[in-house]
Image (cartoon, rainbow, N blue to C red):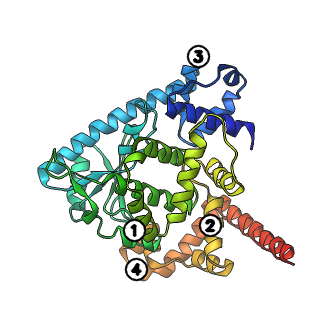
Amino acid sequence: MKEIYKDFICLLSCAVNGTQPDKARVQNMDLEQLYRLAKYHSVRAAFCIVLERAGVHNKSLFEAYMKSVRKNIYLDAELAAITSDFEHQGIWYMPLKGSVLKDLYPETGMREMADCDVLFDAQKQYQVMDIMIAHGYSAEIVGKSNHDVYKKPPVLNFELHSALFGSSHAEPLFRYYADVKRRLIKNKDNRCGYHFSDEDFYVYITAHEWKHYSGGGTGMRSLLDCYVYCKAKGGQLDWNYISEQCRQLEIADFERKRRRLAVKVFSSETLPRLTESEAEMLMYYLTAGTYGTVENSIKNKLRKQSKASYILHNLFPNVDYMRKSVSFVERCQLLYPVGIVYRWGRILIMRRKLLKKIIKVMKQNDNRKIQDRRKGH
């Protein structure tokens, strides 16, 4: 493994464990390259904190850290104001993911937030939209998937979830969370707020991570979230219950491997010896970044279906996809054939780089299969 990755993991480990990295080692680190890697994985705030402990002051990292602190404070204040209106109007809700995880990190702002995720009563979707608009947000996307997107300049973003998973996601995940409210626990200090048990919260963030991991991939912040949660809650959790829920979700193998890797990687600032499969999994996290890659997405899809099926699906996606992708198809489904032609033209004119990536990955996949067959002989 490249030394830069070892340094990257060392700093993250020190950050979440409250330790100080070796100053001599830090002096020999390539901070410019580490900054780029930290940005790619949305962990610049953690890097700032740990490097400050070692006496290293970096302006770019400090600015990212202060932005993270401010954004966390703003999002908390906005969440309180918005859910107060939910309370007044009788709309049940539950904060999700980073909104909860950030408070388990050892310092304020260490866990960066792109947006604030909240599950809410799907029957009150347009009532919720009125609340968000009244708070100064623009409704970017509403009613097109399992989450609605609201933004307020300069930095505030909310993703309000009418469901945890949509019908386009893996069937076991969609089925398991179809009636999510029965898994929720009522808050004692308000009228409409809910929360997961610690076990169910862990199961959900694992399922959500798997959705990304099995698609375009996900980065080291996700692995770090797992470690931080297990460090804070692991000794109190009912792991038999968690294992059974993950079995139902068909992600038990992923949960077990990912948790073992997270604990192994972040428990010490010195990267331990990894098995071949652990090293491969770690590199997948390291190279995917926060939001995954197009290449990973294509490769993972080609593992699940034939090349012909993949091409056909992309040339002629189903009506539900086209309704979300092309506005005039949403208004009139009879325009689906026109929408297909419009989509082809849009890809050829505006997304040629993506098309080139798809072709490149398909060729690589074909070459890999040929090599595998040769090895088999």
* Amino acid type, label 2: Asn
The kind of secondary structure element at disc 2 is: helix
- Circle nearer the N terminus (2, 4): 2
Please identify, in this view, whether the residue under mark 3 or under mark 2 is nearer the observer: 3
Question: Tag 4: residue type?
Answer: Gln
Alpha-carbon distance for marks 3 and 1?
A: 47 Å
Kindly indicate the quadrant of the structure image that contains residue 33.
Answer: top right
Q: How far apart are labels 3 and 4 at the CA level?
A: 61 Å
Give percent across and percent down for residue 369: 78, 73
The image quadrant of residue 270 is top right
Q: CA distance from mark 3 to mark 2?
A: 43 Å
Q: Amino acid at mark 1?
A: Gly
- Kindly identify which residue carries mark 3: 55
Nearer the observer, 195 or 142:
195
Residue 333 marker? 4
Q: Which mark identifies residue 300?
A: 2
Question: Can you tell which mark lies on residue 49?
Answer: none
Query: What residue appears at the point 53 percent right and 58 percent down from the top-left corner?
Result: 256
According to the picture, the residue beneath numbered tag 1 turns out to be: 166
Identify the secondary structure beneath mark 1. Answer: loop
Residue that lies at the very extreme toward the top in this rendered image = 55
Q: Nearer the viewer, mark 2 or mark 4?
A: 2
x and y percentages locating residue 20 in the rendered image = 57, 24
Task: Tell me: 360 left or right of 156.
Answer: right
Which badge, 1 or 2, is on the more N-terminal residue? 1
Frontmost of labels 1 and 4 is: 1
